[in-house]
Structures are given as structure tokens and as C-alpha cells.
Amino acid sequence: MSVIFITGIDTGVGKTYVTGALARYLKDQGKSVITCKLVQTGSTHPPEDLLMHRQFMQESLHAYDQQGITCPYVFSYPASPHLAAGMENKTINPDKIDQATDRLTKEFEYVLMEGAGGICVPLTPSYTILDFLTERRYPCVVVSSPKLGSINHTLLTLEMLANKNVPVLGICYSLAIPSTLEITKNTEALLRERYPHLPFVFVPFLNIEKKLVVVDFSSFKLET
């Protein structure tokens, strides 16, 4: 595979941490990898999520980051992509995202594309991230968490991806959001019972200012 899409059950669940950790894992396996983001809101150039990816990978900003190839759309207003774009009198065009992605896939074995929020986030008033994934069939990594409401959001996300025949590589259980041990263990057990065929990887809270914790993604089928 070439493009892997990292989606979350909601905003702020740890997609950026997972994207950076997965990029670090693939890099340590000797793979050629770059991360990208289809759209970032509430930010300026260079997008803050890409800066965090590069910190995880222990790399400086790539030329493609500076050129806007790894994030074709950046909007300053912190809102859903369709609204943030509208605030600047712009419209998100999926073709522009595809053109940028094509450039990256020609140079790298793996392109990790971080989403924005959950899968039903609108890129335009009539076009969601789920529409984008349905058309392209990018295999997804779903980032869940132990916060309250996550069971519902995770099951809905997995069900909708399955209904649209979008492949799922596995579930990343992000511990970036604090919770109780009881909730964490119960949520994990329920998700494993409902989706026993999906690999399940814990992603701890990673302190990028200190020694990076390397996450083992070997249970995911990541072969190109």
C-alpha cells in the first residue's frame, strides 16, 4: 500500500500523535515515509500538525512542507474545514488534494495522511471526509480513546467505514486523553470483542520533548 489514512472518532483524540508515531515506526523499519494532512484549520503555515509529525520523525521540515504539498489547505479560523474555507471565500477541491498526494506517492513508499476530526466532517457543505475515503478506498487507521462517549463514536466510525467498504488496518487506542483504569480496560475489552479481527495498538502519551516512546505497529498489515 502507499497511502494510509489516519482518522479519529472525534477531534482532539490523538490523530497527530498516532500519525507521527506510525511514521517513526516505518522510518525505523527502513521505509521511505512522509506524512501529510488534507486540510488544517486554526493554523498558519507551516501547519502545526506537520511540525509535530516531523518532531516525532526527528526530521526538519521537508521542502514539500514549505511548498504546501503536504497540506494543500490551511485556514486560520478554528472550525470545520468547510466553514474555515468559507471564512476565507475559498472552497476545498478534492482534486487539489489528489494532485498533492500523487506527487508524494511518486517519491515515498508510504504516505500517511492525517484527517481532520472524524469521518463525517464536511470538506464542503455537500462532501465529507467519508465521501473522500469512499471514492479512494485508502486503508484507514482508526484512532480511539478512553474518554467518555468513545465507545459510541468508535462503533459508529467502524460501522460507517464497513458500510462504505473502506478497509480498516486496525484501531489505535490513544492514551493522550486521561481516563480511569476501569474505563480504559472496559473500552478496550468491548472493542476487542466486537472487532476481534482488527489489530489493537496502545499509543501512550508521547513526550516529544524528551526520549520518544517507540510504538510497535507490527500487528498492522503495512506491507507495500
Image: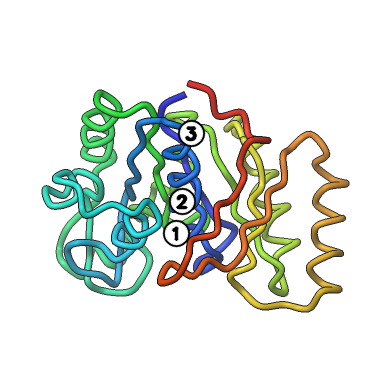
Q: Which dot marks residue 16?
A: 1
Amino acid type of the residue tagged 3 in the rendering: Gln
Is residue 44 shown above or below 19? below
Secondary structure state at the residue bearing disc 2: helix
Q: Would you call the spot at circle 3 few (<14 residues within 10 Å), some (14-19), or many (20 or more)?
A: few
Residues marked 3 and 1 touching at CB (< 8 Å):
no
Q: Position of residue 66 (x, y in %)?
A: 13, 52
Residues marked 2 and 1 touching at CB (< 8 Å):
yes
Question: Between disc 2 and disc 3, whose residue precedes?
Answer: 2
Q: Which dot marks residue 19?
A: 2
Task: Name the residue located 29 percent from the left edge and 40 percent from the top edge.
Answer: 94
Q: Which dot marks residue 53?
A: none
Is residue 135 shown above or below 120? above
Q: Position of residue 44 (x, y in %)?
A: 19, 68
Would you say 61 lies left or right of 22 here? left
Secondary structure state at the residue bearing disc 3: loop
Give 168 or 52, whichever is nearer the viewer: 52
| Residue that carries the numbered disc 3 in the rendered image | 29
Judged from this view, the residue extending furthest toward the front is: 211
Secondary structure state at the residue bearing disc 1: helix
Task: Name the residue located 45 percent from the left edge and 70 percent from the top edge.
Answer: 210
Task: Name the residue located 52 percent from the left edge and 54 percent from the top edge.
Answer: 18
CA gap, disc 2 and disc 3: 15 Å
